[in-house]
Image: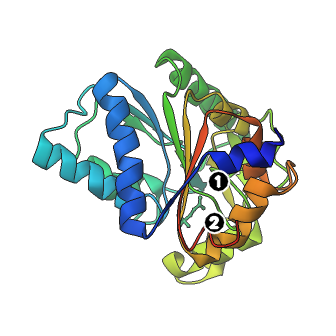
Amino acid sequence: MPDSLTALSHVTVSPDYHTLCERVADRIVELVLSKPDAVLGLATGATPKGVYQALIRRHQEQRLDFSRVTCFNLDEYYPMSPDSPHSYHSFMRENLFSSLEVRQWSVPGGEPRGPEQIERDCLAYEAAIREAGGIDLQLLGIGRTGHIGFNEPGSPRGSRTRLVTLDPVTRHDAAPDFGGMENVPTQAVTVGLATIFEARAIVLMASGKSKADIVRRALTGVVTEDVPASLLQNIDRVRYFLDSDAAERL
Ligand code: PGA
């Protein structure tokens, strides 16, 4: 079967953002119930926020236990202090981990430091994922450039955790959060594509009309490093959760 047909057979379209988030939360809950010490790969951005709210609600209302779960986030701006309100450390603390107790959570380090130290820290992040047993479920958003994590167009499919340069489109999209594009960092540390592809399950979610074009290219277009999310077409363990706006061009 052509890759794009496989990808399309793995799409779930929800009528709205709320339903989309509940379905993705269902998938995570199903994993944690079957494997209470699961390792989750998590994402930041507007898209997964509703999933995190759903997980917190289920933890509070249904006493779902996450205390043995380990979480690794995909990326962090560079340079970026973990205490900055713009950091993905802060995002995860505010949106999930201040309300949900897990065994351990990690976000790649964005503190300014020399290239050799960055490389050592990236290797250590990869080693920590391996030592935890690898990622059971990797949650992904998708940027308008087709990035997953901060793997921008041109990222090698064999890439590992590393310092990268952000695409201007990505910086433009982040500008409102930073009060202007000139304040958005030009670099980031991201988990690599090869690391993402090793996850035992991958859930890519997208919401809204602004994602419809890149969703079409990623799921039905040419498989190319120029659209990093298109490389997921080669992986059978990927499930795409979209709302009807993001799916409108499929
Ligand atoms: P968003 O970002 O959820 O804020 O649209 C997605 C991404 O860049 O991965």
Which three-letter amino acid code belongs to the residue tagged 2? Answer: Pro
Q: Nearer the viewer, residue 118 or 148?
A: 148
Q: Residues within 10 Å of mark 1 (few under 14, many from 20)?
A: many
Task: Work out whether residue 249 or residue 103 is closer to the camera in this orientation and state it.
Answer: 249
Quarter of the image holding residue 125? top right
Q: Which residue is mark 2?
A: 185
**Secondary structure under badge 2?**
loop
Q: Quadrant of the C terminus?
A: bottom right
**Would residue 51 appear left or right of 130 to someone viewing this image?**
left
What is the C-alpha distance between the residues marked 1 and 2? 7 Å
Q: For the N terminus, give its image quadrant.
A: top right
Q: Is residue 98 visible?
A: no
Identify the residue shown where x is 48% and y is 56%.
44
Left or right: residue 170 versus residue 17 is right
Q: Quadrant of residue 185?
A: bottom right
Q: Is residue 154 left or right of residue 23?
A: right
Q: Which residue is mark 1?
A: 188
The residue depicted at 50 percent of the width and 76 percent of the height is: 177
Within 10 Å of the Cα at label 2, are there few (<14), some (14-19), or many (20+) other Cα atoms?
A: some
Say which mark, if any, is on residue 159. none
Residue at image point 67% right, 77% down: 172
> Where's residue 91, x and y in %?
39, 58
The front one of 136 and 73 is 136
The front one of 95 and 77 is 95
Residue 74 horizontal/vertical position (percent): 55, 44
**Disc 2 beta carbon < 8 A from ligand 1?**
no
SS assignment at label 1: strand
Callout 1–callout 2 Cβ contact below 8 Å: yes
